[in-house]
Image (spheres, rainbow, N blue to C red):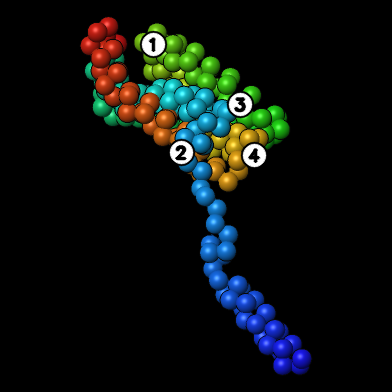
């Protein structure tokens, strides 16, 4: 009887040691969600399309603004370059302000800040056409405002807003994949702006 007890105890200890020495991945296997599953999370595609529009506007300004200032408004290259930098300067402050406002004033409900900023981006983009011909000061002010308004949503949509949507859907384990989808759709906007801007300029002018 004593020998059987010892044998049973020894066998139990051996099994426990094998289990403890086994890698975590071997003990618990979790199937990662597919791209299609993550894309079906409510709100992810909407965020991606919003990011598409934001990046379309932002990269249009970044890539075409120096050319426009030089060829259309006849600024010298140095002045065109300095004015174009104002877009990123405005973006620096806009990103910080957007994140701070989301946490401070709306309790993390970030779309309440992002949505008005996107609307103001469109408004200032429309105003920029006539305003930039008034003079260099008006040009600089509107450019700063566009940079401020467009960069905040750009920084939040593929990051914090995506995290919020995943957490509300109970899918916090796929935040990285969701962020990649949102940012990937946005990148299509960055690609699209290249030839679409050229087509519009050829057809209708600046």
Q: Disc 3 vs disc 1: which is toward the camera?
A: 3
- On the rendered structure, is 17 left or right of 147? right
Callout 1 secondary element: helix
- Residue that carries the numbered disc 2 in the rendered image: 35
Q: Is tag 2's residue or tag 1's residue first in the polypeptide sequence?
A: 2
Locate residue 57, reporting x and y percent.
41, 22
Residue reaching furthest right?
1
* The C terminus lies in quadrant: top left
- Residue that carries the numbered disc 3 in the rendered image: 111
| Depicted 25 relative to depicted 197: above or below | below
Locate residue 137, reporting x and y percent.
43, 18
Q: Disc 2 vs disc 1: which is toward the camera?
A: 2
Crowd around label 2: few <14 · some 14–19 · many ≥20 (10 Å): few
- Residue that carries the numbered disc 4 in the rendered image: 170
Quadrant of the rendered structure where residue 55 is?
top left
- Residue that carries the numbered disc 1 in the rendered image: 129
- 74 or 3, nearer to the observer: 3
Locate residue 42, reporting x and y percent.
58, 28
């Amino acid at each position: 009887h004593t020998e059987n007890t010892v044998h049973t105890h020894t066998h139990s200890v051996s099994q426990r040691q094998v289990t403890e020495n086994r890698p975590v991945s071997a003990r618990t296997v979790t199937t990662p969600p597919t791209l299609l599953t993550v894309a079906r999370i409510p709100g992810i595609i909407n965020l991606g399309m919003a990011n598409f529009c934001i990046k379309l506007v932002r990269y249009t300004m970044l890539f075409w603004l120096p050319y426009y200032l030089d060829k259309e408004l006849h600024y010298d290259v140095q002045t065109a370059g300095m004015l174009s930098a104002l877009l990123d300067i405005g973006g620096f402050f806009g990103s910080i302000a957007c994140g701070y406002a989301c946490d401070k004033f709306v309790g993390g409900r970030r779309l309440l800040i992002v949505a008005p900023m996107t609307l103001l981006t469109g408004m200032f983009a429309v105003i920029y056409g006539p305003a930039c011909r008034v003079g260099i000061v008006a040009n600089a002010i509107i450019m700063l405002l566009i940079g401020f308004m467009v960069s905040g949503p750009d920084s939040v949509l593929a990051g914090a807003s995506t995290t919020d949507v995943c957490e509300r859907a109970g899918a916090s384990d796929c935040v990285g994949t969701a962020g990649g989808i949102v940012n990937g759709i946005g990148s299509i906007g960055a690609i699209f702006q290249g030839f679409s801007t050229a087509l519009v300029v050829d057809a209708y002018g600046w």
